[in-house]
């Protein structure tokens, strides 16, 4: 399976959850590393674009194409098992605990979770501490200029 990740050039050399651990995010608390990827390029872009304006849009984004081997088990979460307020903004602590527990359990390397930004699409969260993480590979990194009409 291929998944996608959009990152600034200075972070576009390796897969790491260090950035999400610095501030925390919807599915992880500060100090917990988790790599956020998307099921398609458009979702990867949308997940980044919701945090930007045209004035703050850097021109150095890179799109990762990442290969997750079919041999890696993926935990798929049905919506009925998500915290009731999982779609709220700003994100609630309940979603961070949910992701933190996924990482701590270390049973699966990848968590398939519904996107808040694009209903019907999915994010794939990667636990960089799972034994199978070493099997996940970046296959391509390319420049990804945003169309200026996307963010205003």
Image: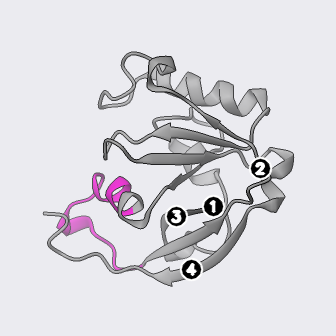
CB of mark 1 within 8 Å of CB of mark 3? no
Q: Tag 1's secondary structure?
A: loop
Disc 1 from disc 3: Cα separation? 10 Å
Quadrant of the drawing holding the N terminus: bottom right
- Which residues make up the magenta segment? 45-60
Disc 2 from disc 3: Cα separation? 17 Å
Residue 53 included in the magenta stretch of the image: yes
Pointer 2 local density, CA inside 10 Å: few below 14, some 14–19, many at least 20: some
Q: Residue at x 33, y 80 (%)?
A: 145
Whichever of labels 4 and 3 marks the residue nearer the N terminus, that label is: 3
* Residue nearer the viewer, 45 or 78: 78
Disc 4 from disc 3: Cα separation? 10 Å
Check residue 85 in the rendering and tell me which mark sits there, or answer none: none
Whichever of labels 1 and 2 marks the residue nearer the N terminus, that label is: 1
Relative side of 136 to 122, left or right:
right
Residue that label 4 marks: 141
């Amino acid at each position: 399976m291929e998944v996608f990740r959009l990152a600034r050039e200075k972070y576009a050399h390796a897969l790491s959850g260090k950035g999400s651990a610095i501030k925390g995010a919807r599915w992880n608390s500060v100090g917990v590393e988790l790599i956020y990827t998307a099921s398609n390029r458009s979702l990867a872009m949308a997940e980044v674009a919701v945090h930007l304006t045209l004035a703050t849009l850097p021109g150095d984004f890179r799109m990762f194409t990442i290969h997750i081997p079919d041999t890696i088990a993926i935990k798929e979460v049905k919506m009925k098992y998500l915290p009731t307020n999982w779609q709220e903004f700003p994100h609630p602590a309940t979603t961070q605990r949910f992701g933190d527990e996924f990482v701590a359990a270390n049973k699966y390397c990848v968590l398939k979770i519904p996107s808040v930004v694009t209903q019907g699409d999915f994010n794939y969260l990667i636990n960089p501490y799972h034994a199978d993480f070493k099997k996940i590979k970046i296959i391509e990194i390319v420049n990804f200029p945003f169309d200026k009409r996307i963010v205003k």
